[in-house]
Amino acid sequence: MPSFTKDVIKRTLIDLLDQKPLHQITVKMIVEECGINRNSFYYHFQDIPALIEEIIMDHLDRFIQKYPTIDSAETALNAAADFTMENRRAMLHIYQSANRDIYERYLWKECEYIVSAYGKTFSFTSDISEEDRRIIMHFYKCECFGLVIDWLNRKMEPDIHREISRLCELHHGMIEEMIRRAGEK
């Protein structure tokens, strides 16, 4: 059951991250902005990194609920990019902080979900080994992850939607060809 106080703390951190880098934000700032005491913060969260992790994992849960199936890599990649763009400054501040690993773990899980859900739309025949199937899916997960990380390293400057669209055009038929080749061995 969601807690009103917990939700206010989460929203406050996102709002503060829109204004300043993570290393400049303290629990004191968060509780003052929320109008709560420190004990209320620590009742819900161990520390700021735990708060960040919960915010990011909440998003992943909402993403999975919104996209229970994925029939297009382009749709999924664009949806993942949209969340980051909606919270652009906050996500950059998290990504550029000492807590970058939290964002990277989230992104890795999101890419894993996207590739796994999208992979269900392909017919992996019995002619393809489980190892080849795993390798193909891992390749796409790494590609998805790398695309977003590179975009974040460029401070989200290029139009990611245009790049995703072009990448998907260039990729068209590639997974089918990989499956075909795996079945030949």
Image (cartoon, rainbow, N blue to C red):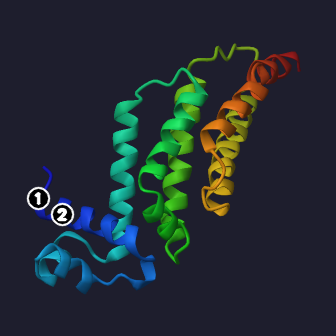
- What amino acid type should be assigned to the residue bearing mark 2? Val
- Residue underneath mark 2: 8
Q: Position of residue 55 (x, y in %)?
A: 34, 58
Give the quarter of the image for residue 72.
top right
* Above or below, 33 relative to 160: below
Residue 171: x and y in percent read: 76, 27
Q: Is residue 155 above or below residue 16?
A: above
Residue placed at 67% from the left, 60% from the top? 154
Q: Image quadrant of residue 29?
A: bottom left
Quadrant in the picture for the C terminus: top right
Do the residues under discs 2 and 1 have CB atoms within 8 angstroms? yes
Q: Tell me the amino acid under the disc marked 1.
A: Phe
Residue at the image position 38 percent from the left and 70 percent from the top: 17
Vertical order, 143 against 6 (above or below): above
- Along the viewing direction, whichever of 75 and 101 lies nearer the viewer: 75
- Relative placement, left or right, of 174 versus 69 is right
Residue 94, how many percent across, how many down?
A: 48, 68
- The outermost residue toward the right is 185
Residue depicted at 42% across the width and 76% down the height:
20
Instruction: Judge the density around disc 1: few (<14), some (14-19), many (≥20) Cα neighbours within 10 Å.
Output: few
Pick whichever, 160 or 26, lies toward us.
160
- Report how far apart the C-alphas of labels 2 and 1 lie in the structure: 6 Å
Report the residue marked by disc 1: 4
